[in-house]
Amino acid sequence: MKKEIELLKSLIKTQSFSSEEDKTALLLENYLKENEISFNRENNNVWATNKYFDDKKPSILLNSHHDTVEPNSAYTNDPFSADEKEGVIYGLGSNDAGASVISLLATFVHFYHQKDLKYNLIIAITAEEESSGAKGLNSLLKTLPEIDFAIVGEPTQMHLAIAEKGLLVLDVIAEGIPGHAAHTNTVNPIYKIMDDIEWFRKFEFDKNSEFLGNVKMSVTQINAGTQHNVVPAECSLVIDVRVNDKYSNLEVLEIIKQNVKSKVIARSTNLNSSAIDKNHPFVQAGVNLGRETYGSPTLSDQSVLTCQSVKLGPGDSTRSHQADEYILISEIEEGIDLYKKMLSNVIIG
């Protein structure tokens, strides 16, 4: 595991904000070269297949991301320091998702030379996850071999997130008739949009999910006007919608459009919810090892996959994007061990 820990420290020390991951992609290339593994690179996405890849077999994708958010102002140490103290590694991206990256790489290397596996393995360490960018995993799927199942590495304390909420971000716009605030020949779009705000606050979707609960809608921004004595031409809202696995994003969007009076524009509809059968062999392998299953409210690259997938990785999601981010070396050791054991139950026949 020494090589992987050194890789993690190098990743932390190398700035890799979303769409700026070219230098960490080189680090990943070097790691694969050192392990004598042939690899491919597309933009800042680095991927490889196991040595005895057989296109007649189904394939499992091992995926995590090597981009990070920008450090917030509350850091008390250098976010790029990669300091190690008493079994703890500190730094931006250590928990989200550097620990998953190196744990999945170590797992892939472990199985790389093995013959007669029941599944192929594909490792893809990808870019632009934090920004849901156009050149991340979503852009790579057309290049990768067909995927039957995926493990998406994110900090879950090595418990299995077997469902994940999707995301819709909506711009909601009410139009008015601008004019002097002292006159009556105006239509105030702020008043018009108030009924829609109340609808977003109170409406409940019919279908609840066992693991993800209900669809959740939140008004997160509102904007109108520039002067105290002018009725504005429009008032706009931003709505954050977290979609459970009982609806597609398009279904939720249509329900919203049917119920609000204002114009509704979706910024994108491709970040869908996901779920996997809790009786899937990989999930059951984890349960048999004492791992819990749950539904995740946070978004990951699962949202761009069409195959069944599970979110699973070392670290704790509550540390993600916080100041003084860190990962325990013991968490990485546990992560590698559990990845190997769970996969062995599925791919070794």
Image (cartoon, rainbow, N blue to C red):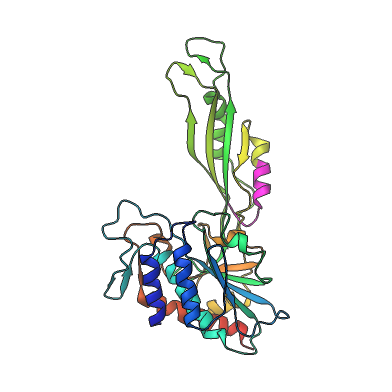
Residue 249: within the magenta? yes
Q: Which of 129 and 202 is in front in this view?
A: 129
Location of the N terminus by quadrant is bottom left
Which image quadrant for residue 317? bottom left
Measured as percent of width and height from the top left, residue 292 is found at 50, 71
The answer to which image quadrant residue 284 occupies is bottom right
Residue 179, placed above or below residue 117: above
- Residue found farthest to the right: 56
Horizontal and vertical percent position of residue 270: 63, 53
**Residue 268 located within the stretch drawn in magenta:** no
> Can residue 291 be seen at all in this image of the molecule?
no
The quadrant of the rendering that contains the C terminus is: bottom right
The percent position of residue 221, horizontal first and vertical second, equals 48, 37
User: What's the residue at 52%, 58% (across, down)?
Assistant: 128
| Residue 174, horizontal then vertical, whole percent | 58, 28
| 291 lies above or below 69 | below
Q: Quadrant of residue 92 in the image? A: bottom left
Near-viewer residue (330 or 33): 33
Magenta range is 243-255
- The structure residue drawn at horizontal position 52% and vertical position 59%, both measured from the top left corner, is 129
Relative placement, left or right, of 51 versus 333 is right
Instruction: Please give the name of the residue rendered at 53% of the width and 24% of the height, measured from the top-left corner.
Output: 191
Q: Nearer the viewer, residue 277 or 92?
A: 92
Does the image show residue 112?
yes
Number of numbered discs? 0
